[in-house]
Image (cartoon, rainbow, N blue to C red):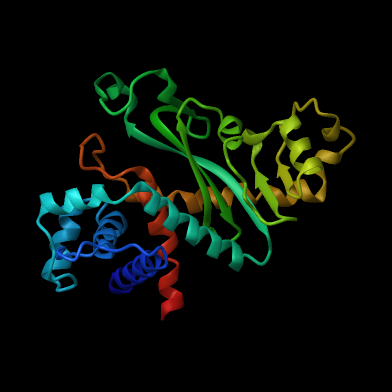
Amino acid sequence: MQDEIITFYVVCDDYLKAMHYRDDPQSTMSTAEVMTTALVAARCFKNCLEHARTVLQEEGWMLGMLSASRLNRRLYAIPEGLWLGLSRALAEVHQALNDGQEYAVDSMPLAVCDNYRIRRCQLYRGEAFRGYIASKQRYFYGLRLHVVVTADGHPIEVVLAPGADADIAAFKRLLLDLPDDATVYGDKAYTDYMCEEVLNEDTPLTWVSLHKRNSQSARCRGGWRISVNMCASASRPRSVRSRIALPNAFMPSRRAGSNSKPFWLSWPVRSAARWQVRLR
């Protein structure tokens, strides 16, 4: 955990300096330290800010640690644009380090409660958040996380959609700000023939998705569906699913509280954790 704490602080501090962000001269705890506390809580304590605050103070990492209430106010006072900008800066670094120019997109459910507790759920309301997990043949209630990652599992872009939204509908919300000649792999849930033709013909990107057996597209007839490219893409979404499952471990067991940080807080955790190896 020592390397992770140092990595989080160095990345946050350098990013704030690059953005020319200045703290109030009377503040006893810098914004970089507040962000580091939140990232440590998400990484090591399942978003329990109080546990992270206590450990960092008792271990001597942050001698000017604020009280629980003041730290909570400082954390929510950080503009959301800083978190999103930090994630975007890390994504640009991951793109620069991705020599193969291969990316993959997949989704995973983020359930806020079990199916039989939907009526008592206060965080979300409505059938739009009731999704279905085909692989497990069960329903869930909450959001669905869609992630574009590199071949090494580094996150590039994230979209949160209601659980009932189809994967292809959320995929169309992605910006796909990727380098030219990049190849994006997806599974059968992202099958849309018109979208596939637009991406492959009108953009410099190459979109490769697994087609269903009962596909009616002309491209899938005549044995094209078992071509080398399609067979090679079959292993991509499976590896992505195992890589984007990590944020689920960061989620608190009880998410209906008012002190829980938004779900996208785990993305800078995942990205910044990659840097501890390089800082050594």
* Res. 185 visible in picture: yes
Residue 136's place in the image compared with 8, above or below, is: above
Classify residue 102 by image quadrant.
bottom right
For the residue pair 170 and 185, the one nearer the viewer reads as 170
Residue 89 left/right relative to 258: right
**Residue 190 at x, y percent in the picture:** 64, 35
For the residue pair 24 and 60, the one nearer the viewer reads as 24
Classify residue 8 by image quadrant.
bottom left
Residue 264 left/right relative to 57: right
Residue 51's place in the image compared with 55, above or below, is: above
**Residue 262 at x, y percent in the picture:** 33, 43
Residue 108 left/right relative to 257: right
* Res. 47 visible in picture: no
Classify residue 210 by image quadrant.
top right
Residue 71 left/right relative to 149: left
Total numbered labels placed on residues in the image:
0
Residue drawn at x 76%, y 45% as measured from the top left: 203
**Residue 75 at x, y percent in the picture:** 24, 51
Residue 85's place in the image compared with 100, above or below, is: above
Q: Quadrant of the C terminus?
A: bottom left
Residue drawn at x 72%, y 45% as measured from the top left: 207
Residue drawn at x 78%, y 50% as measured from the top left: 229
